Image (cartoon, rainbow, N blue to C red):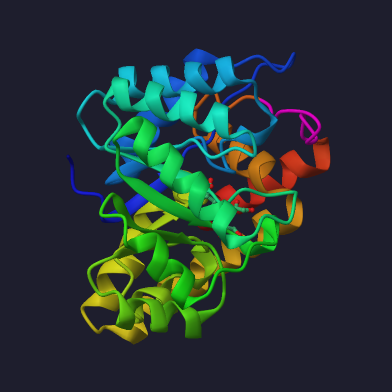
Amino acid sequence: MKKLTGIFSALLVSFNEDGSINETGLRQIIRHNIDKMGVDGLYVGGSTGENFMLSTEEKKQIFRIAKDEVKDQVALIAQVGSVNLQEAVELGKYATELGYDSLSAVTPFYYKFNFAEIKHYYETIIAETGNNMIIYSIPFLTGVNMGIEQFGELYQNPKVLGVKFTAGDFYLLERLKKAYPNHLIWAGFDEMMLPAVALGVDGAIGSTFNINGVRARQIFDLTRAGKLEEALAVQHTTNDLIEGILANGLYLTIKEILKLQGVEAGYCREPMTAKATEAQREKAKQLQQKFL
Ligand code: NGF
């Protein structure tokens, strides 16, 4: 298994105007991440990959293309979580056979599952695939808020490596790291990377690393080295960029910026707005010129 710590891009997927996957564009995004951003790995099939709007076959296609393009150059994590447990297992088996270094699964969402049901979900995916598991906790989208004891229960399974923590609850983050120092935490909010690294996270997984991966690594390394003023300066610039991206449409804007850099990043997947307006393209151009 490859090292799973450090800077991981949450991989964007290029779509054609009709919504189908643009394989050439997807491969270019992957190459850009490895060759230009210098990431340690890719998180495939996450929110950034517009995953929850795709069919099972499309998700498999993306896992297959990513593995084929990456080979063994960087680590690969497959997000296989789904509110359909059978689909999660099927995807987990598929990614495991392809050689993904770890699986990750979002907490089951939409229905108000109790903790016993959530635990059963993770135990089932692990038992059926035999692969490692990273819990994907993103309460602001799923509504699932787990506490320290619940993480502890999930961590009793030796295959659970840790959590991708997309939340601003730094008290919980600190408590988790103190209580379970051998379990890994990946920071999920790029705009809050510095405080997360200061509290001891082992890595970060982010959408904006597709274009801002070099600064993300600077924040990570400088904070770990205790150079907080320098790290904060980079975080400020990063957040000026992220603020502009969020105001203009998250994935659409990152894709428009990638296009300006010669990467065929394509369209988004409906029901998200698939195509940038002229005004959004112009804003992306300004962000590119100012920050990248
Ligand atoms: O895009 C989202 C959720 N969050 C990502 C990241 O946590 C998602 C984050 O980078 C991810 O890793 C995945 O693809 O599953 C934000 O986009 C960024 O911090 C800007 O807020 O909406």
Q: Is residue 170 above or below residue 249?
A: below
User: Does the magenta run of residues contain 138?
Assistant: no
Residue 276 percent location from the top left of the image: 77, 35
Residue at image point 81% right, 36% down = 278
- Image quadrant holding the N terminus, namely top left
Left or right of 285 on screen, residue 249: right
Q: Is residue 13 above or below residue 48?
A: above
User: Does the magenta run of residues contain 269?
Assistant: yes
In the image, the segment drawn in magenta is 267-276
Q: Nearer the viewer, residue 284 or 85?
A: 85
Q: Is residue 180 above or below residue 252?
A: below
Q: Nearer the viewer, residue 92 or 241?
A: 92
Classify residue 223 by image quadrant. Answer: bottom left
Residue 160 percent location from the top left of the image: 33, 53
Residue at image point 48% right, 14% down = 24
Q: Is residue 3 visible?
A: yes
Residue 240 percent location from the top left of the image: 59, 67
Left or right of 161 on screen, residue 163: right
